[in-house]
Image (spheres, rainbow, N blue to C red):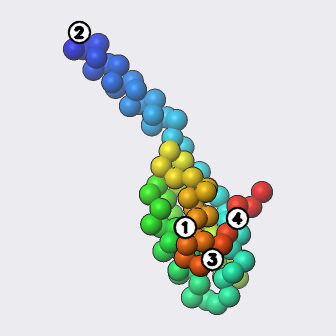
């Protein structure tokens, strides 16, 4: 019986890991007006749980974010930039 419970628990944990996927999204951040702005945007996005990498560019006015979609959402990412003073939206 305990072996059956252990197998079931392991299956559930593995299924949860399979359902979670690493995603990459590009956010338009038009309010970046100087070369220091991307540092602030990157720090804000990096604090969102599940974010594994951020590349923010002043020249392109964008942030490319890689995140675990089981832990973070695009909505959380855009809220993080807005809370830092840089409203953003995902590119289509």
Residue 64 sits in quarter? bottom right
What residue does disc 3 label?
86
Q: Give SS at disc 1.
A: helix
x, y (%) of residue 30? 72, 77
Contact check, label 2 and label 4, Cβ < 8 Å? no
In primary-sequence order, the first of circles 4 and 1 is: 1
Question: Taking 21 as reference, is 44 above or below it?
Answer: below
In primary-sequence order, the first of circles 2 and 1 is: 2
Q: State the count of labels.
A: 4
Residue 79 appearing in the image: yes
Identify the residue at image location x=54%, y=43%. Answer: 21
Residue 9 sits in quarter? top left
What residue does disc 1 label?
80
Contact check, label 2 and label 3, Cβ < 8 Å? no
x, y (%) of residue 82? 60, 71
What residue does disc 2 label?
1
Q: Give SS at disc 2.
A: loop
Q: How far apart are marks 4 and 1 (CA)?
A: 11 Å
Report crowding for label 2: few under 14, some 14 to 19, many 20 or more residues within 10 A (C-alpha): few
Q: How far apart are marks 1 and 3 (CA)?
A: 9 Å
x, y (%) of residue 63? 63, 70
Q: How far apart are marks 2 and 1 (CA)?
A: 46 Å
Q: Distance between the residues labelled 4 and 3?
A: 10 Å
Task: Using the image, tell me which numbered label, if any, was put on residue 89.
Answer: 4
Contact check, label 4 and label 1, Cβ < 8 Å? no
In primary-sequence order, the first of circles 2 and 4 is: 2
Instruction: Give the camera-side residue of 6 and 82.
Output: 82
Task: Assign the N terminus to one quadrant of the image.
Answer: top left
Nearest to the eye among marks 2 and 3: give it: 3
Contact check, label 2 and label 1, Cβ < 8 Å? no
Q: How far apart are marks 2 and 3 (CA)?
A: 55 Å
């Amino acid at each position: 019986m305990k072996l059956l419970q252990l197998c079931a628990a392991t299956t559930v944990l593995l299924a949860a890991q399979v359902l979670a996927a690493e995603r990459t999204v590009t956010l338009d951040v038009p309010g970046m007006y100087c070369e220091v702005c991307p540092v602030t945007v990157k720090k804000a996005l990096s604090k969102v749980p599940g974010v594994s990498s951020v590349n923010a560019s002043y020249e392109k006015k964008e942030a490319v974010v890689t995140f675990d979609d089981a832990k973070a959402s695009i909505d959380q990412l855009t809220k993080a930039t807005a809370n830092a003073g840089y409203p953003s939206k995902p590119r289509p």
